[in-house]
Amino acid sequence: MVPVTYYVALSAILFSIGALGVLVRRNPLIIFMSVELMLNAANLAFVAFTRFYQTLNGQIFVFFVMTVSAAEVAVGLALIVTIFRTKHSINIDEMNGLKG
Amino acid sequence: MTVDLLLFFILALTAIATALGMLMSRSAIYSALFLVLNFGTVAVFYILLNAPFIALSQVSVYAGAIMVLFLFVIMLLGTEVLPDTKALPWQRPLAVILAVMLAGEAIYLLFIRKAAGGQIPAPVESFGSPQAVGLELFKHYLLPFEVTSVLLLIAMVGAIVLTKKEKGGQ
Amino acid sequence: MTFFYLAPWIVFLPVIGLLVNGFVGQRFSEKVIGIIASLASGLPFLISILLAYSLAGHSEAVRWSVGEWIHVGKLQLDWIFRVDTLSVTMMLVVTGVGTLIHIYAIGYMHEDVRNKSDIKRFRRFFVFLNLFIAAMLILVSGDSYLMLFVGWEGVGLCSFLLIGFWYEMDTLGRPSWANSEAAKKAFVANRIGDFGFLIAGFLIFWSFGSLQFDAVFNAVRSISAVNSPLIVAITLFMLLGVAGKSAQIPLYVWLPDAMAGPTPVSALIHAATMVTAGVYLIARSAALYTAVPAAQFVVAMVGAVTALFAATIAVAQFDMKKVLAYSTISQLGFMVAGVGMGAFGAGMFHLVTHAFFKALLFLSAGSVLLGMERGHHSLSHHPVNENRSLKLRSTHEAGKTPAEQDAHPEEVFDPGDMRNMGGLRKTMPVTFWVYVIGALALAGIFPFAGFWSKDEILAAAFSQGYTVVYWLLTIAAFLTAFYISRQIWMVFFGEARHEAAAKAQESPRVITVPLMILAALAVLGGALNLPKALVGEGLGEKLSVWLGQTISIPPGEFIGSVALISTGLALLAILISWLLYGREPLKVGDADPLKKFLGPVFTGMEHKWFVDEGYKALFIDRYADIARFTANVIDGRFWHDWFHEKVIVGTYNFLSNIALDRYVDQRGIDALVNGVGRWTKEASASVRRLQNGFVRSYALAVLVGVVAMLGYLLFK
């Protein structure tokens, strides 16, 4: 059998890749997708642990995470669309209105 | 090397590869498609981990709905490839280093410190079946379930409001 | 039945008088002011009589305490009134003669303020007079040298105030600082004397440990046995004080100038009372002086030399009051010589009789002066404008009364100049007769008061072996008779040499009645101390016995030969003066006949032997030189120009401009403060770069935090 550590390690690697994507890419859509990847990696860790501890709590949790992430994607994409309408660009480097 | 382990490694590689592909693709569409593949792989993992319901939810919600949304928006916004930037040149290498560090710390924690442990025990028959999940959901997690529905409503309203054009132009 | 409890009132009553007159007197008429002031002097006289009566059966001195004063370490002094025979004698003289002079002054000042056109000043005169009486009584009633000194200073002040009463004029009423200068001279000369008194006081306190009379006098024997030179020093310094206050050589120069004050002032202060304070002081300190015969000799010599010196000057004076002033100095010399020789009874006797006849002479001279003024006013037929105050006008018109300005445009009239007088016995008979009585008393003619007292001094000098003193005093007595009879011939006999004298009028009763009372005292005053040799134990030497209760008085002498010589010389002097002045009375413009005989000696006498000029050249001008040097060179060039400007201001400028401003402020503090600001700007500029607006960098920051936290938790 596969030890649960392997699953968690995989989850960690996927998470790191997602984090790297958030930092490095300049297309907001791809950044968003990286966020989804991170969420997914966390879900994987949940499921692995819940299988390890033989309770269903983890799966319920994943269920909710999925729901929330779906809602979040909807709103986030709407935001991106709105920003694109005003800025006419999807380069995240140009969205620097918070510059001090 | 058992079959499970072999299978795990192959699937793990696929997952990592697709993740990396998503990361490094020039085109946004290619990234989205890579991500779809990644979600699919993760769904297989769920099946392996006796979470069929979750697996299929993953496929239908994540890969099906969310990624489709992504693709719609990508098409909407145009898929031009962004030119290389000259701003913050130091940020890219630093980010790579940090991500590697993060992964490294996790690996260290897991394998050298052995924080999590143990073999996965034998599965119970109806562990993770929709029936079981549903029972759990509606018995013990009813309130979050209902609140989630409100959340979805809010999301819908929010999305509509955000993208609504002003009346009469301007 | 004793009245010692009344003792403090001799001082309180004059003070009340002066406060009443001073603060509410504006509304009173001249009469009321005068009555208040005279009562303030007269009631103390009654009290003095009661005190004398109380002392009669009580030979010990009575010390009546009024209150605590100084209690500092060894110095324990209270305000205590000492009622003993010596102080009561002085009290009686001061208040008695003083009251008569107050009454006289009501009439005199009534005319004087009108002559000088300032009737509002009438009240001020009486305030000052009462102040004087109070101060003089403090002097004589003090129980310690310090209380005496308080009074001593007080009478000095009053002398200044009263000499300079008409401070903006000179004696003839012209605008000038002459009167103020005379007042200042009196004060300064007195101050030099006070210096001597103070040194003596310090030495007394230092050696005796107390300033109180009994404590000092009881300890004289023991201290003088140990340290006789100390007592000599004390007595000689005290003599300096006496020379100042009682106008002896070398400090007598203020008294003739003091004639600038109104005549009642001259009578009261500069004849009868204040100037006798020095004599009183020596008499009071009898214990000290008798312990050191060397000092006694010095005192006696000073007195005798002064007596002769002043008499020579008096011979050649033409101002009426100046003659009397020098006469006073001379007679004070007699008194000082008397107490200096240890004949305290004789000295005090002469003090009392001199008070009578000198006050009489001065007041009568005042009457003569007023008579001359009246005559002068009646000449011009212009009424005197009483309400015009004397303002300083141009020198051409200045100083004359409106009457004078109208009548005699260029002439200044001096009513006191004897060369303007003559024949006044016909126009002012009462004044004439009282003046003659006073003159005879002064000259020492039997049986007037002056004969007895002067003779007692001469007899004491003769019998105690002070031969030089005796001869000096005898010659002075000769000159005394000469100058006073010269004055009588010039003033009252012959023909008037000026129209004012011809028209002179007699004075009113308020003036002549006190004169008559004093004349009676001048006649009868000798009865106070008649020699026992002549009248026996019962009647004789009343005063000496009375005083003997307090200080040791040697028995009085009566030496017939001395009396004969002095009387003979006096009559001879009167004869010579008659030959010179009385037989062929002077006419207008005549020189003094004595000038023919004495020539340059007469000029010297007339110019007071140039003593004032000598003092000016020796002291006053040198002092002015020192002052000028100190002011211009030391203060001006050195202190101000160099030290202040270069050293202090330069250093300050250097410190502030260069040291502090350039180095500390600009380079130091400004650099620091501005540096903080600049550093803050630069730091914030560099920190601001964190906020670059790039989402990627923000996300990176988050990841950095996560990795760091994880690392910390891992490796903790």
Image: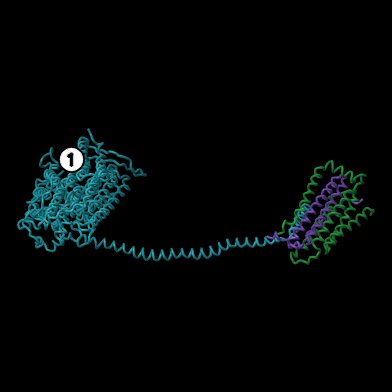
Chain colours: A purple, B green, C cyan
| Quadrant in the picture for the N terminus of chain C | top left
Residue C579, located in which quarter of the rendered image? bottom left
Q: In the picture provided, is B95 more to the left or to the right than C333?
A: right
Residue at the extreme left of the image, as rendered:
C583
Mark 1: which secondary structure?
helix
* Residue drawn at x 85%, y 61% as measured from the top left: B21
- The front one of C201 and C433 is C433
Callout 1: residue from which chain?
A: C
Residue C414 shows in this picture: yes
- The front one of B99 and C280 is B99
Q: In this view, does C266 lie above or below C88?
A: below
Image spot of residue B85 (x, y percent): 76, 66
Q: In the picture provided, is A83 more to the left or to the right than C430?
A: right
Image spot of residue C372 (x, y percent): 12, 54
* Residue drawn at x 93%, y 53% as measured from the top left: B4
Residue at the extreme front of the image, as rendered:
B168
Q: Is residue C344 above or below residue B18?
A: above
Residue at the extreme top of the image, as rendered:
C1
Residue kind at label 1, given as amino acid type:
Val
Q: Alpha-carbon neighbours of circle 1 within 10 Å: few (<14), some, or many (≥20)?
A: some
Residue C563 shows in this picture: no
Look at mark 1 in the image and give the residue it sits on: C545
Image spot of residue C76 (x, y percent): 33, 43
Image spot of residue A95 (x, y percent): 73, 61
